[in-house]
Image: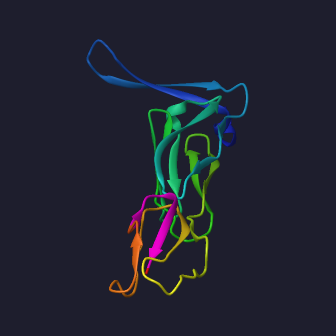
Amino acid sequence: YKSQDWRSYTSVYGDTYNSNGQCGSVFIYKKLSKDPAISVETISVPATGATGEASYTTKNMETNDVTATFATDWISAEVVNGKIAYEVEPNYTGAARTGKITLASATYGITKDVTVSQAADVFKVSATSVSLKAEANSTATFTVTSTYAATIAVADATKWSVTPTSVAGGASAVTVTV
């Protein structure tokens, strides 16, 4: 085969021994029928982060000839047993973000970018202010919606109380009492 066409061939390497115990090398080259390719879907993760696996497929090449690299500090990935094993850190930025994992085959000189989409973290309060009557045990209620667990406190606990003082992720009703 011509040296400039090497990506169109696949090779198999084997060792043979003669009757004297000497080793000889054998290279067998086979022309591929079509161009090699890697296919993969987008990976979507919640704001809280995730550890998981994603499948990819290869065409006209070996699945185990693929490696993974990443270019962001909030994504890590590697190829394990023909799958992309990934870890995405929690997103505290307040905005959705995207990154990428690059799958590559050094043998065939091809790459495929995998988009990693991560949702924005959320922290919302249903009211910017609450009104209370100027009498003992007056209450007002508002809703806290958060991706993460949150602690709720008042500036002067001798005059005000709040229940609950912590909420899990999701939406929670919070009551302020005078």
Query: Does residue 35 appear to the left or right of 117 in the view shown?
Result: right
Residue 111, image x, y percentages: 63, 48
Magenta stretch encompasses residue 155: no
Query: Does residue 115 appear to the left or right of 89 in the view shown?
Result: right
Residue 101, image x, y percentages: 56, 53
Magenta stretch encompasses residue 167: yes
- Residue furthest out toward the right: 34
Residue 15, image x, y percentages: 38, 23
Image position of 125 with respect to 149: above or below: below
**Residue 7 sits in which quadrant?**
top right
Image position of 53 with respect to 21: above or below: below
- Residue furthest out toward the left: 21
Residue 48, image x, y percentages: 48, 57
Rendered residue at 61%/75% (across/down): 127
Rendered residue at 55%/30% (across/down): 62
Image quarter in which the C terminus is found: bottom left
Task: Work out whether residue 174 can be spotted.
Answer: yes
Task: Work out whether residue 85 can be spotted.
Answer: no
* Helix, strand or loop for the magenta stretch, by majority: strand
Q: Nearer the viewer, residue 27 or 164?
A: 164
Q: Nearer the viewer, residue 65 or 40?
A: 40
Query: Does residue 122 appear to the left or right of 156 in the view shown?
Result: right
In the rendered structure, which segment of residues is drawn in magenta?
166-177
